[in-house]
Amino acid sequence: YALAMHRANHPRTRHMLQDVATVDAVSMCDGRPIGMLWMSPDCTDHSKAKGAAPRRENGKTTRGIGWAIFGWVKALPKWQMPRVIFLENVEEYVDWGPLLPNGQRCPKRKGETFKAFVAAWEALGYVVEWRERRAWWSGSATIRKRLFMVMRRDGEPIVWPERHYGNPNVPEDAARIAAGDRK
């Protein structure tokens, strides 16, 4: 349903139903530069809400999708690489690190892979910032925390949006939100 809705609202967008690791970035972009790329890699293996080990019973994991997207961008000629990249994920994404042989996260190496991920983007010429934000700050009726990263290589500053809405768990704020009143 989400894809059908996106197609209806963006009929000129090319939708590809395949694993990002198998996409040929150069041919997909058809010789056009990319202005903006939005990444929302699978968060299941990073989230504390999952309540289990990051490695699944079959030994597979989706923890490396961020690296697949990085490889996709790196494969592009420099002139074609996105000027701005956004990443949205669970707050625990910053804790991304190696796993122990039993499939659990290694507490001593917490955040090691995330730091390498950031450094790799910086090596491609991107300025990288990240912040944890509450969904309700932007008008969503949930208090969930999310991690947002912004990566730019166009020389423009990274500007973070201000909070525009109240907390949906505070009765006065919830009433204003329901009435469509900001702040």
Image: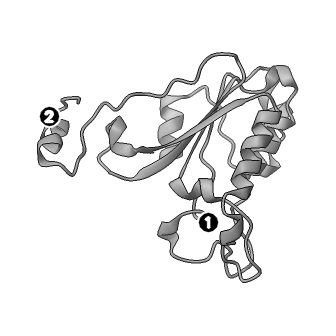
Q: Position of residue 44 (x, y in %)?
A: 57, 64
Q: Position of residue 176 (x, y in %)?
A: 15, 36
- At 70% from the left edge and 23% from the top edge, which residue is drawn? 83
- At 36% from the left edge and 36% from the top edge, which residue is drawn? 138
- At 64% from the left edge and 71% from the top edge, which residue is drawn? 54
Q: Quadrant of residue 47?
A: bottom right
Closer to the camera, 13 or 33? 33
* Image quarter of the C terminus: top left
Q: Quadrant of residue 74?
A: top right
Closer to the camera, 115 or 164? 115
Instruction: Please indicate, yes or no, whether residue 112 appears anywhere in the rendered image.
Output: yes
Q: Residues within 10 Å of mark 2 (few under 14, many from 20)?
A: few
103 relative position to 140: left or right: right
Tag nearer the camera, 2 or 1:
1
Numbered mark located on residue 45 in the image? 1
102 relative position to 30: left or right: left
Q: Earlier in the sequence, mark 2 or mark 1?
A: 1
Up-down relation of residue 72 to residue 35 (above or below): below
- At 62% from the left edge and 66% from the top edge, which residue is drawn? 45
Question: For the residue marked with disc 1, what is the amino acid?
Answer: Asp
Question: For the residue marked with disc 2, what is the amino acid?
Answer: Ala
Q: Position of residue 155 (x, y in %)?
A: 69, 16
Closer to the camera, 156 or 81? 156
Numbered mark located on residue 96 in the image? none
Q: Position of residue 39 (x, y in %)?
A: 63, 42
Q: CA distance from mark 2 to mark 1?
A: 37 Å
Q: Quadrant of residue 105?
A: bottom right
Residue assigned mark 2: 179
